Amino acid sequence: MRSIKAIFTKQAKDMFKNPSVLVMFIVFPAVALIMTSFVTIPENEYYSENMFVTMMASIFVGMGLITSASGVIAEDMERKSLRFLVIAGVKPHQYLLGTGGFLLFAGTVTSVVFALIGGFSGMETVKFLTVMITGAAASILLGLTIGMFAKNAQAAGGLSMPVAVIVGFTPMIAGFNETVEKAAGVLYTQQINVIVNDFSENLVKPLLVIAGNIAVFTVLFVIAYKKKGLKG
C-alpha cells in the first residue's frame, strides 16, 4: 500500500511538471464549454443541446487518455524511474494502481466537469460517469501498455497516436457505416458512444464489453511490464 501511495503522489507531482499531459485534462472540457456556449443553437434541429459535450468527452476518453498514459510511462522509462521501481520490488499491480490510479482520478474529475457542462439529469449523470470512468480505465491501461514499447515520451506519441485515432474515431465512422458499426461493437469506445448519445440505452451490454476490454488490456500490461520494465 505504501508503494502504491508513493507512486500515486509521484505521478501527481510529475503531471503538474508536464504541460503536455496536464493540458489533455483541460483542453477537451474547455472546448466543450466554449462550443456549447457559443455555437450550439437550441432552435436548430441539427444540433443536440449537448452535442459538443458528448463529442469532446468521447474524444477525451478514446484518444486523449491513451496518448497521455503512454507518454507518462515512456517518460518514466526514459528517466530510468521504472527500472529503479522494478529493482526495488514494485509489482506490476502496484505500479498500475499508483500511476493508473492517479490518471483515473484525474480523468474522473474531468468527466465530472463534462457532466456539469452538459447539465445532465440525475440518471443521465450516473450513466454518463459510469461509462466515462470505466472507459477511462480501459484507455489508461491501453496507453500504459503502448508506452512500454517507446524509448522516450516523444516516441510514445508516435506509437500511441495511430492506435488512439483508430480507437477514438471508429465509433464516429460507425455512425455512417453499418458494417463498421457491427465490427466496432467489441470496442469499449463504441459502447461509450452508444450511451453518451442515447441515455435511454441499457448499461448492461456496454459495461460487459468495456469490462472485457479492461481484462484484456490488464493482461497485456502485466506481460509488457514483466518483459520491458527492467529495460526502462
Image (cartoon, rainbow, N blue to C red):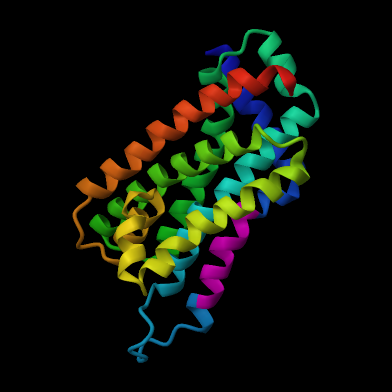
- Report the front residue among 136 and 205: 205
* Dominant SS type (magenta): helix
Confirm whether residue 97 shows in the render: no
Above or below, comparing residue 137 to residue 28 in the picture: above
Whether 136 is among the magenta residues is no
Q: Position of residue 154 (x, y in %)?
A: 77, 46
Residue drawn at x 38%, y 39% as measured from the top left: 213
- Report the front residue among 62 and 226: 226
Above or below, comparing residue 1 to residue 169 in the picture: above
**In this view, which residue lies farthest toward the bottom?**
43
Above or below, comparing residue 229 to residue 102 in the picture: above
Residue drawn at x 61%, y 57% as measured from the top left: 26
Q: Is residue 49 left or right of residue 71?
A: left
Q: Is residue 64 left or right of residue 195?
A: right
Q: Position of residue 33 (x, y in %)?
A: 52, 70
- Report the front residue among 39 and 55: 55
Q: Position of residue 205 (x, y in %)?
A: 22, 48
Q: Which residues are magenta?
A: 24-35
Count of numbered labels shown in the rendering: 0
**In this view, which residue lies farthest toward the right?**
79
Residue drawn at x 54%, y 43% as measured from the top left: 106
Whether 28 is among the magenta residues is yes
**In this view, which residue lies farthest toward the front?**
179
Confirm whether residue 211 shows in the render: yes
| Quadrant location of the C terminus in the rendered image | top right
